[in-house]
Image: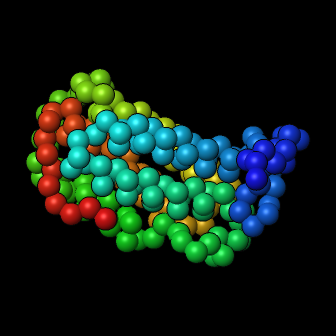
Amino acid sequence: MSIVTKRGDDGETDLWFADRVPKHHPQVEAYGAVYEAQAALGLARATAPEWLKPGILQIQKDLFTASSELATLRGKAARLKERVGPERVAWAEGEIARYESVIKLTDWTLSGESAGGAALDLALTILRRAERWAVRLRDEGFVENPDLLVYLNRLSDLLFLMARAVDRGIVVGGQVG
């Protein structure tokens, strides 16, 4: 079976549950930015120290769930098997606290101190774009799950701290998942 379906040749694409929208639709922009962030996180994971890889992988999995929500037309999100919930927000906040317990931010940091940190910073900036699109979708009634927006916002903070840990060679121990 080929991956070539020709269904996008007319400038439209499929969302979940067989809905079709133009490829320039805000939902496509939002889940596309999430997908870009996942790819940047793949680069970050490939270059990250071993202790950090499970945390990055968890975020990539969570972003897959987030992109599913963003690719579902209003009123149909309840049909999804998984959604970003308060437990994912709590996880991100716990991770942020864990990183903040060992990383002291005393001045502004420029990206590029390490390849892994730079890849995490790239993922962070792409994720911020996805968050802006998700806010637009919320304002237009397409995103009904407030936890999704909170989670995307927390992830940006977490990725910033992860990048600083990699740049500074700080190992942050503890549980991930």
**Residue depicted at x 44% and y 53%:** 60
Above or below residue 68? Residue 2 is above
Colouring of the image: rainbow
Estimate the x, y position of residue 128 in percent, counting from the top left: 47, 41
From this view, report whether residue 93 is shown above or below residue 34.
below
How many badges with numbers are in the image? 0
Q: Would residue 12 be found to the left or right of residue 64 on screen?
A: right
Say whether residue 173 is visible.
yes
Residue 135 to residue 29: above or below = below
Task: Compare residues 113 and 160 and report the one nearer the observer.
Answer: 113
- Nearest the viewer among 45 and 59 is 45
> Where does the image place residue 40, in percent across and percent down from the top left?
45, 38
Residue 69 location, quadrant? bottom right
Is residue 138 at least partly visible in the picture?
Answer: no
What's the residue at 70%, 71% (across, down)? 76
**The C terminus, quarter of image:** bottom left
Provide residue 59's location: percent of width, then percent of height: 39, 54
Q: Residue furthest front?
A: 1
Q: In the picture provided, is 133 more to the left or to the right than 128?
A: right
- Residue located at (19% from left, 40% from top): 165
Q: Nearer the viewer, residue 107 or 68?
A: 68
Q: Nearer the viewer, residue 30 or 146?
A: 30
x, y (%) of residue 107? 17, 29
At a point 48% along the width and 66% down the height, the residue shown is 84
